[in-house]
Every structure is written in structure tokens, then in C-alpha cells.
Image (spheres, rainbow, N blue to C red):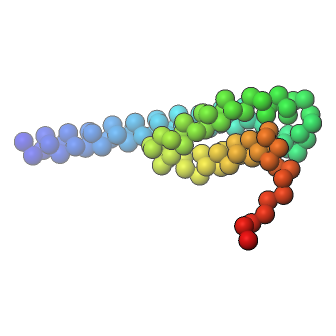
């Protein structure tokens, strides 16, 4: 009886590890796809370029995907740094799209 319990627990741990590994890979592929579709830092340095303008207009779709990853607790724990970096990039794109990047930011008195 005890050997069967240990074997079942071992099998469950192995399956859990395999599942987490597959999910880690899937989240990594999702992040790579989002990065490929978002406007790059180099493109953001040329905001008047037609390709950049088009990319900025399409960014909300990709940034919604980033938000979904950020809101998912397992994905967030597995790939926290990459997801947060993408989210900061999305915030920068949103600032440029709204013109907030042109406003001088001042700290409160």
C-alpha cells in the first residue's frame, strides 16, 4: 500500500513537472510572438515613420496579450521579468501614442 502511494505521488510530481515545463515553453513562445509584433525601441526613436505609426496603432492588441500574461498567476511566476519588461515597453508605447512622452515630468513639491 505504501509503495503504491509513493509511486502515485512520484508519478504526479513528474506529470506536474512536465506540465509546468510545457507551459513555461508556451509562455515563452507567446512572449516571443508579442515581441516580434510590437514596435521596437529603434522604431520608437523615429515616431514620424509610417511603419512606426502603424505599429503604434496596432500595439494595444499586443499589449492586451501582455496584460493577460501579467494577470495570469502561473505565467507571472514563471516569466515575471520578461512579462514586466514587455509591460513597461507597452506603457512607453502608450505614452508616445498619447503624447505624454513630450510632457516634462516634474516630481511633486
* Residue 98 pos. (x, y %): 79, 40
The residue closer to the viewer here, 82 or 14, is 82
Q: Position of residue 104 (x, y in %)?
A: 84, 58
Q: Residue at position x 79%, y 59% from top?
A: 105
Question: Outermost residue toward the front?
Answer: 109
Which quadrant: the C terminus?
Answer: bottom right
Within the image, what quadrant is residue 74 found in? Answer: top left
Residue that extends furthest to the bottom in the rendered view of this protein:
109
Q: Quadrant of the N terminus?
A: top left
Q: Can residue 36 be seen?
A: no
Q: In this orientation, which residue lies closer to the viewer: 49 or 11?
A: 49
Pick whichever, 98 or 28, lies toward us: 98
Quadrant for residue 37, please give it: top right
In the rendered view, tell whether residue 80 sits above or below residue 26: below
Query: Left of 19 or right of it: where is 61?
Result: right
Q: Where is residue 87 drawn, in percent x and y?
A: 64, 45
Please tell me how many numbered marks the rendered image carries. Answer: 0
Q: Residue at x 85, y 34 (%)?
A: 52
Question: From where the camera sits, is residue 98 visible?
Answer: yes
Residue located at (54% from left, 39% from top): 69
* Residue 45 screen position, x and y as percent: 88, 45
**Residue ID at (30%, 43%):** 13
Amino acid at each position: 500500500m505504501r509503495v503504491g502511494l509513493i509511486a502515485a505521488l512520484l508519478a504526479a510530481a513528474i506529470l506536474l513537472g512536465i506540465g509546468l515545463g510545457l507551459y513555461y515553453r508556451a509562455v515563452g513562445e507567446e512572449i516571443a510572438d508579442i515581441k516580434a509584433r510590437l514596435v521596437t525601441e529603434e522604431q520608437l526613436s523615429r515616431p514620424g515613420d509610417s511603419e512606426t505609426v502603424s505599429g503604434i496603432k496596432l500595439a494595444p492588441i499586443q499589449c492586451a496579450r501582455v496584460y493577460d500574461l501579467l494577470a495570469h498567476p502561473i505565467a507571472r511566476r514563471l516569466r515575471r521579468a520578461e512579462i514586466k519588461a514587455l509591460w513597461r515597453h507597452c506603457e512607453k508605447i502608450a505614452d508616445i501614442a498619447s503624447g505624454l512622452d513630450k510632457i516634462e515630468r516634474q516630481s511633486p513639491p
